[in-house]
Image: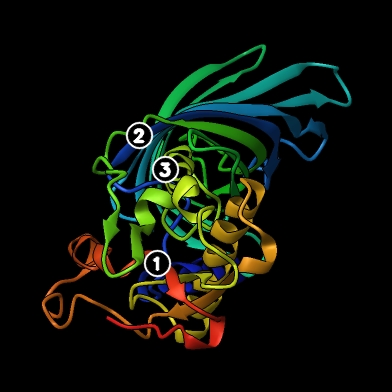
Amino acid sequence: MKKTTLALAVAIASLTTAAYAAQPENTWYIGGKAGWSSYHDATFYNGASDNMHISKDRVGGGVFLGYQATDYAAIELGYDWLGHADYRDKTTGDKSQLRVQGIQLAAKLSYPLSFISEDLDIYTRLGGFIAMTKYKSPTLTDSDSDVAPLIAAGFEYKLSEDFAARLDYQWINNIDNKGDLRPDNSLLSLGISYNFGGGAPAKTTSIDYKENRYVLNEDVLFGYNQSTLKAEGEEALNGLVSALTKINPSEGAVVVIGHTDRIGSAAYNQKLSEQRAKTVMDYLVAKGIPSDLITAKGAGKSSPITGDKCNSLTGADLKACLAPDRRVEIEINAKNVEEVEVTN
């Protein structure tokens, strides 16, 4: 009961918080896992196992295919091999064995743990498991299939744009063999997945120039909810280096201003905008802009440029509509940092 309550709490938090998982929305991914499979309550209900030694721990694993429907919700289809439980009669020495494998279908709900790492998610999986069991003893061979409830929780860490690793604890309840065996199974596993991408719209590296202010869309510079420069972001900034290095330190300063959209809390967006502005500043300094000529500041979600045109939208449509708000501005006409005003 406690496990079910915990999983439901994580699921509700995932659905009601404006946060986004590491896997990009509208993309497919595939992966595999391996770990420790253990059977619980694996005794016979008719008492036949009272005089038996039961070996319940084995290597298990599986493969899975998933579709990330939104930033925080996915559906997964997988195959699991749960190993086997071995039985040995202490009196006669006779041996028997229960093997279990099956197909699972589950909803995966994720929530990013950005206060620890921008690449780390916590998630829960809720669904069903079609268990295919086979029990074999010296006097009986019995095969069967049945549906059992499945619940899982874990952590997922984004290794790169394409790969992610996960630590997963899975519980399958009452695997029915239609006989006197109805064990539970837990599987603690490590896994890795590959994301095929292709769901996100193509980004442009165009740069707007307005009154000595360069405006770059943050989706070009960074992944969503990230502050690490992408390759196309570096390419866009490289195009500005030659112009910025021509500034006379006695006549002007360079100020990098980070902006976010309105999704999420003000405190979180302020921190993210500051991190992104500093990332851009550090990159430009590494490319030759004098460190005493450039500074960075975050505006959070305080200066949107979309107005109220996105008010009627939700989910992915809202995120796409608010894209112009997610931007980095580079001001080059101020004589000092204090003169810079964050405007629309």
Q: Residue furthest top?
A: 138
Q: Are marks 3 and 2 in contact (CB under 8 Å)?
A: no
- Can you identify the residue that label 1 sits on? 329
For image coordinates 35% across by 67% down, the residue present is 213
- Can you identify the residue that label 3 sits on? 239
In the rendered structure, the answer to whether residue 278 lies left or right of residue 39 reads: left
Q: Are marks 1 and 3 in contact (CB under 8 Å)?
A: no
Which badge, 1 or 3, is on the more N-terminal residue?
3
Q: Give the spatial CA distance, label 1 vs label 3.
A: 14 Å
Front one among 25 and 11: 25
Q: Give the spatial CA distance, label 1 vs label 2.
A: 28 Å
Q: Specify the amino acid type for callout 2.
A: Gly
User: Closer to us: mark 1 or mark 2?
Assistant: 1
Judged from the image, the secondary structure of the residue bearing numbered disc 2 is loop
List x then y, in percent, for residue 298: 51, 77
Quarter of image, res 65: top left
Residue 226 can be seen in this image: yes
- How many residues crowd around disc 1 within 10 Å: few (fewer than 14), some, or many (20 or more)? many
- How many residues crowd around disc 3 within 10 Å: few (fewer than 14), some, or many (20 or more)? few
Front one among 54 and 161: 161
For image coordinates 38% across by 80% down, the residue present is 301
- Can you identify the residue that label 2 sits on? 197
Q: Give the spatial CA distance, label 3 vs label 2.
A: 27 Å
Position of the N terminus by quadrant: bottom right
For image coordinates 41% across by 39% down, the residue present is 232
Q: Residue furthest right?
A: 91
In the image, residue 196 sits, relative to residue 261, either above or below, namely above
In the rendered structure, the answer to whether residue 208 lies left or right of residue 17 reads: left
